[in-house]
Amino acid sequence: MLDRRSFIALPFVLAACSGGPRTLDLVGRTMGTTYTVKLVDHSGRLSKADVEVAVSAALEVTNTTLSNWDAESDVSQFNAAQTTDPVSVTRPLYDVARAAEDIRQASEGRFDVALGPLIETWGFGARGANSAAPSEAQIAAAMAQTGQGGAMTFGAGTLQKAHAGQGLFLSAIGKGYGVDRVADALRALGAEDFMVEIGGDLYAQGRNEDGQPWRIGIETPDDAVAGLQGIAGLKGHGMATSGDYRNYFEQGGQRYSHILDAQTGRPVTHQTASATVVTADAMRADAWATAMLVLGSSKGSAIAEANGLAVFFVDREGDRFVTRATSAFAAVAA
């Protein structure tokens, strides 16, 4: 799953305070990227070993359910089933696919987890980069195998493909799902104040060791420029940022982003460089961030307002960046 980290956990907020509550910090690797867990233990009764076991178990469940790079995972097994008959799937996979379909419909088809063939055709998938942009014929052939070729049907614990070669590619929603499962595991231990982050998608609950909401900085969408475009104060929210500036290739003076428009089969070409979404959970923030970046700030703002979404856009305007936020974002801006 691609790392699209585009935030900064502000150090003056996350730094430990002498004499204050104990802060447990965990870092590691999962889903082809890194994760961070920061937990404020007011009681002093939480064991770091117990936290590590709980976090590892939650991440293991996520990988065995949603990893497209694990041939034995639930999603890989479903994708390998070359049939249009209903296929029984696990509850976690069903729930993620159902959420993705709801967002696909609400985003006018711009968010599509069946884009695997198209992603591979453009060289942004597991097979690796291409030496050149695909031809029109290659794009058309890949489009026929995506969600644009027909939506999946949801039954009682089953998924039914519109065509046998269809599959689910969950990198744009899976990290957020993993964040939520880790958050569930921490709550089960009795934790109330924590932040969980996987590859740039995060969830923060309660308050930091200073007794303040977790403040997360939104980076300038340019690897050559260090800076912040905005700050969100999170207290029981998921947050994700999608940007077009880290995974791309250039050919003949043309820049091709890894953010693909499901309706055209091509990388987006508008001037929106990043979109940050804050929702009640990380999974939907993850998915909506991709949808908003595909839509761009103009169309995306209208859809976000209609759905009550807190979204922060950063657009390129010549040699500078300009920001645009939906009305709901004002409630979390810090």
Image (spheres, rainbow, N blue to C red):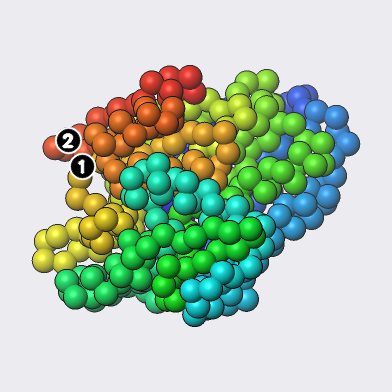
Nearest to the eye among marks 2 and 1: give it.
1
Q: Is residue 242 visible?
A: no
In the rendered image, the residue lying farthest to the right is 45
For the residue pair 61 and 164, the one nearer the viewer reads as 164
Circle 1 residue: 271
On residue 286, the disc is: none
**Residues under labels 2 and 1: Cα distance?**
7 Å
Disc with the residue nearer the chain's start (2 vs 1) = 1
- Looking at numbered disc 1 in the image, what kind of residue is underneath it? Gln
Q: Residue at x 65, y 31 (%)?
A: 205
Quadrant of res 275: top left
The residue carrying pointer 2 sits among few (fewer than 14), some (14 to 19) or many (20 or more) residues within 10 Å by Cα, namely few
| Residue 265 pos. (x, y %) | 25, 61
| Residue 164 pos. (x, y %) | 44, 76
For the residue pair 278 and 317, the one nearer the viewer reads as 278
Q: Say which element carries label 2.
A: strand
| Residue 119 pos. (x, y %) | 35, 66
Above-or-below relation of 83 to 19 = below
| Residue 322 pos. (x, y %) | 25, 30
Image marks 2 and 1: residues in contact by CB distance under 8 Å: yes
Circle 2 residue: 317
Quadrant of res 40: top right
Above-or-below relation of 283 to 249 = above
Q: Say which element carries label 1.
A: loop
- Looking at numbered disc 2 in the image, what kind of residue is underneath it? Glu
Q: Residue at x 68, y 20 (%)?
A: 211
Is residue 110 shown left or right of residue 201? left
Q: Is residue 270 visible?
A: yes
Q: Residue at x 52, y 34 (%)?
A: 279
The residue carrying pointer 1 sits among few (fewer than 14), some (14 to 19) or many (20 or more) residues within 10 Å by Cα, namely some
Q: Residue at x 78, y 24 (%)?
A: 19
